[in-house]
Amino acid sequence: MILDDQNRMKSIDQSNMLLELQTLPDQLAEAWRIADTYNLPTIKKINEVTIAGMGGSAIGADILASYVNDQCSTSVSVVRGYALPAWVSGENNLVICSSHSGNTEETLSVFQEAIQRNCTLMAVSTGGKIKSMAEETMSVFWPFKHEGQPRSAVGFSFGMLLNIFSRMHLIPDQKNFLDSAVRSMRTTLAEIDVDIPVSKNLAKRIAGQALGRQPVVLGAQHLEPIARRWKTQINEIAKGWAGFEFLPEANHNTLAGLEFPEPVLEKIYAVFLLSKNYYTRNQKRFELTFDQFMVSGLCTDKIQIDEKDKLSEIWRMLLLGDFISYYLAMLYEVDPTPIDSLENFKKAMKS
């Protein structure tokens, strides 16, 4: 019953990660508001947009790229690494470097390479080295203030990118869709916050199912990056192992792996993120895949949030996943904020 004991959870959550999750709707709205006050890069024609980032800074780009896929006639790609693809070159290629700290070495490398290739360049960050590099090269720099972990700044990393695409007319105006998403998130928050008991709280129930198991999250289309987000939040917040799969790709390989090793499969918890906004054929695939997982003896679950517009569905599902990860951390009795293993790895890379 720890999930209904708010005092116990406060004692575990030493850095108040809960507040970061509770204010995510406000953060998304704030990201749009401050982005509206900034100047856009000057570019005559955009052939392609490349967004560079890692970890929590990259997930906002993933969500953006997936969301605009059926709206944007310009190619959009996300780079997680040190180098730009060979075809990204010239002033008609817009490169956006997103780094929460401004010191992410992979993203700084991409920034430097974009300068050498004469790309139109801009950066989104709280500051750091990338701010200095942007100022030195007279590149557009969009700052935001956030003192928490990069993973809890996804509202900024997505909202500011969405504003760029909207104001540069790469996609239809998004202000009404963003406002709707913020309202929908607040509705979800009222249903899954800490004061809602386990008996009425979907996030707490799912966390209870995930306890002691290895979650695997399955999504499609606009919810593909949300499946990935759930996985990474379980890693970083709950310090637990997790995986993610995409449909229809999983129907061409993953289904064949539901036999061995049996002791591992018995520990799998497969969560299917459903949507009425999926292609009809993908909806059928989800039903058939879910049935196959059940027949194979895996613990399975379905989650569906009905929204007419995809942006609201994306953000309600993201918020739900964040709270599930938080409640799983409470069940494991681990502080959700520190990521010592990642920090120690970064230090080792510098030595």
Image: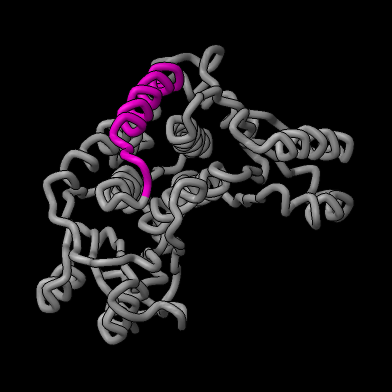
Q: Nearer the viewer, residue 102 or 213?
A: 102
- 296 shown above or below 84: above
* Magenta stretch holds residue 7: no
Q: Residue at x 16, y 49 (%)?
A: 145
Extreme residue in the front direction? 44
x and y, in percent, of residue 133 in the image: 16, 76
x and y, in percent, of residue 203 in the image: 52, 26
Q: Residue at x 45, y 80 (%)?
A: 87
* Magenta stretch holds residue 175: yes
Q: In the shown orientation, is residue 233 left or right of residue 171? A: right
Q: Quadrant of residue 126?
A: bottom left
Q: Residue at x 55, y 25 (%)?
A: 305
- 139 shown above or below 220: below
x and y, in percent, of residue 63 in the image: 45, 48
Q: How is the image coloured?
A: one colour
Q: Which residues are magenta?
A: 171-194
